[in-house]
Image (cartoon, grey):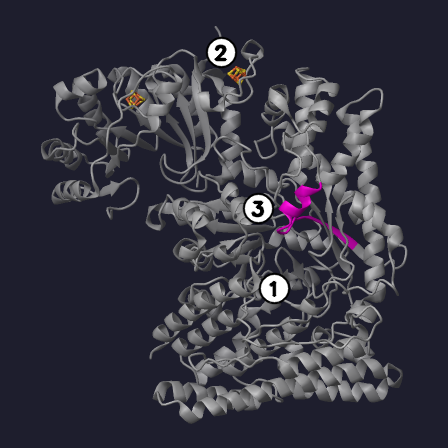
Amino acid sequence: MNYKERLAELRKTKIRHTLEKRGQQGYMNADDYGTVPLPEGYKFTPVPNSPNGGFYGYTGMAENYCRMLDGHPIYVDPLEMLCGRWRDMMVNYRRATRWDEARFPFDELKPAHELYNITHGIDNDSHFACDYRIGFELGFGGLLDKVRRYAEINTDKKEFYNAEEAVLLAIMRFIGRHIDEIERLLESEERPEIRASLEAMLECNRNVIAKPPKTFLEACQWTAWFNCVSRIYTRDGAGFQLDGLLYPYYKADIESGRLDRDTARFIMSNLLLIDPHYYQLSGVDENDKDLTNELSYLILDAAHDLNIAANLTVRVHENCDPEFLRKAVTCLFRDRNGWPRFCGDDSLANGYMKNGFDKATARQRIAVGCNWMAIPGREFPMNDTVKINVAKVFEVAMSEMKGMGARSTELLFQLFRVHLEKAIAATAQGIHLHIKHQADVTPELVMNLMMNNCIEKGEDISRCAEIYTIGIDGAGLAVAADSFAALEQRVEREGILDWDTVYSALESDYAGTEGERTRAILSSAERYCGGNTAGDRWAVRITEYFTEAISTHPLTWDGSMRLIPGWFSWSRTIEYGKVVGATPNGRHSGAPISHGANPNPGFRPDGAATDMSTGIAAVQPGRGNTAPLQLEFDPKISEEEGGIDRVLDLITTHFRLGGTLININVLDGEKLKAAHANPDLYPDLVVRVTGFTAYFATLSPEFRQLVVDRFVKGF
Amino acid sequence: MGEVTALIADIQHCSLHDGPGIRTTVFVKGCPLNCVWCHNPECISPRPEVMYHADKCIGCGHCAEGCFSGARVTCGREMTLDEVMEELRRDKPYYGGSGGLTLSGGEPAIYPEFSAALLDRCAAEGIGRALETSLYAAPEVLMPLLRRCDIVMCDLKHSDPELHKKYTGAGNALILENLRLLDSLGIPIILRTPVIAGLNDDDENITAAAVIAASLKNLKYYELLPYHPLGVSKAAALGREQTIFEAPSPERFRELAEIVKSRSVPLRIAGRGTDI
Ligand code: SF4
Ligand code: SF4
């Protein structure tokens, strides 16, 4: 079998796995993570170390992790060249008891968290990024030596070092069991080319079980192992600058003749198959030099060969290799899997520098998450785990104004500000609690291994990160902005409606024909992303306030920590919408809120992506975190006919105007509708849901509807 | 003297099918022809018209105070140059090297003064200019507009003068004359035929069209556009009836493509190469 045939088989297996997993787990509404289905009869029973039945802290986490790894099923596919697939994860056994509330209660924060529908991030994990160079340099054996060495120095940190040591030993046992399995497979494997690659896999794993990786294959295998064991621990999905860190291995192997390009490409496809970690490609160093190299191209080719979900982000900057950028856009059209995504260096780096960092530091902050950036090894950002539903904040302000005398959008905005401030304060307190006690609850025993300071100091990353720039995202911007705009236009400017009519329509959820007419009047007002409309102006005003309030919010417990604003709902638009009553933008009670920084569906009759791009570029908080532009295109224009150029114009212009992140789905509208009606016929249809890509067939009907609704017809 | 204005039916931002690159298409309202298959029937009358979309009516009974549901909408707004320019400027950052304004309709030549001034303003601001025209206008009115463009898109609806008259309300002599004049300007031309089964999809007509296309020095490509019943519901909203036609089958398109290609004419079908 040649590589192409092997990949075709692996793709088939992947599709089968997707359907099997849906059978096992139901609708997933999340990243696929590259997992394989669990074998029949597999069972894991955690050992609690708390009266509430949960397990916590260095010892509790280490003990259960080791038990999980020791019992975790082994998966080696002889058609692959790498191993390291995973299926179970610790979070599955901690859902009800993730945070130890008995010891670290936050009852006093709960009313505010509930009132403003805050996703507080207390108990969340893994939203930072490892410095893979540390692991590449030391290997698991070297990491173990390092842990033991520092254990002797920091004798008061015994529990920490014991836990880290146990984790490393468990990882090595886990790899060891795979080595046994490879040996077993070799006993019966007769196909010569598969034997050869199994032998290579065997040798590679015998090396990387303890030693640092030396070749391209070993570096990829090492990466696969770390990703796998880190996923099992806390589902960590942050990758690294893939074309940068692997390049020296690739170059050396190619130059010495140890590796040919086709094999390198297959290995890369294999790595991407194993796990859709978030990797950045291309980019720019602190001296503005473009970092694109031969491997950047090869990675896109490898992803194309594989043609499944992937989370690759291309960093776009002024000196970007235009050929590479064109190739990246071409992938969107050819494979239609929603990758790569694009992030805008200019706005991200300059924005981050506003927090008081130099350019070199800002440039290290790469795309490693769904919507987020982090500095590998150095930063603890909790990015994407903390969110405030501003549609809910708006609703609170709106109902407070009801009984007041001189009602106006100005007064409403003042009330909105007050409540937003309260929401931010309650959020910040939650963040404080989390940082203070993460180590006691969910220490990051795996990721700590590749974070600066942790092993050296004997501390969990939450306690010793070099940089704390903690992200708070707002969700529902368009709902709030369109609501303000509709009130301003229809009540104040035109006088078509009065406040009482609006309030009673909201209370009745626009019931009856009169309610429906009120709704029509409000929802046809000037919307956000309509192009220089009242909605656009309100969105900017809300953003300005949101940005200022978050980035200047005093963190009383530590002056060196900073909060960073962004606009992102993740995939929670349905969930967030359920708790918000009818809003003055014509939205019904309980309907989903707007997605990320996107406008509400139907924002313009022509659905102009240009106005959307301009509108979103204008609402960037601009402190280094994102407010993504999410586009769904129907490729009515083909590649040959200039489709690529048009998308390139759109991408580069959005970034020039200040945009930070672009997620693009190139979808066939008809196919999307057919798949919505009958998902099982399209098990390989991949869509970019938000920052992550997912198999359409694994999404719930509600969720699929959302993707269908978002579809921009024009493009 | 009052400000120059035109009655505008619609301005479409981020348009991708009306010429190269990302464009903004300005549809003027008013057309001297009356094609039986017209896909923009709301652009034929040079006066504002009310369109009524029954499916959007919520039955509130407040028509006199204004309709907000999108059921009853007035098509046609008198716009000044400044107002149109402002819309264009919003899309301008996205035009890149190839995009820009597409002035369309209806027939832009029915507003010669406005159209010329708009094209000049775009030229002054570095905005690309495309014209979509029926070519049915007096040469002295049309030529000054054509001259101001980077690219012109025009139709060859039927090569037979009688049938042209039957289906569009006018013969094709003036159009063919204008086409020759246009070709003398050295501006790239995209020539198109909306192909309707039974009306103009016969070998003879397409052969004649291909011969004309082949004779053009500045032809960028010739495009066959399969009929789409886009205009039917819009005509209904205007209280008019439009016959529903059919597009030729893919097999027929393949045959027509062969006819065109045999004359060495660069061809596209519905914007996409010639694969069907
Ligand atoms: S020339 Fe165009 S706008 Fe005028 S009637 Fe014919 S199809 Fe309609
Ligand atoms: S105002 Fe509009 S929605 Fe209401 S009855 Fe009239 S046409 Fe129908």
Q: Nearer the viewer, residue A47 or A124?
A: A47
Q: Where is A191 relative to A382, above or below? A: below
Is the Cβ of the residue at disc 3 closer than 8 Å to that at disc 1? no
Write the residue at 46% across / 48% down. A676
Q: Quadrant of residue B266?
A: top left
Amino acid on which the number 2 mark rests in the picture: Glu
**B115 lies above or below A104:** above
Q: Residues within 10 Å of mark 1 (few under 14, many from 20)?
A: some
Q: Is residue B147 visible?
A: no
In the drawing, does residue A679 fall left or right of residue B38?
Answer: right
Judge left or right: residue B55 versus residue B217.
right
Residue B54 in picture, x, y percent from top left:
45, 20
Q: Which residue is mark 3?
A: A629
Q: How far apart, in angstroms, are the residues tagged by discs 3 and 1?
A: 25 Å
**Residue holding disc 1:** A285
Whether callout 3 and callout 1 share a subunit is answered yes
* Marks 3 and 1, the one that precedes in the sequence: 1
Residue A572: say if magenta: yes
- Which residue corresponds to mark 2? B3
Amino acid carrying mark 1 in the image: Asp
Q: Quadrant of the N terminus of chain A?
A: bottom left
Of marks 3 and 1, the one in the foreground: 3
Quadrant location, ligand no. 1:
top left
Residue, x 45% and y 42% (percent of image)? Answer: B96
Magenta stretch in the rendered image: A563-579
Chain at tag 2: B
Please give left or right for residue B208 compared with residue A355 in the image.
left
Q: Nearer the viewer, mark 3 or mark 2?
A: 3
**Chain identity of mark 3:** A
The chain letter under disc 1 is: A
| Disc 3 element | strand
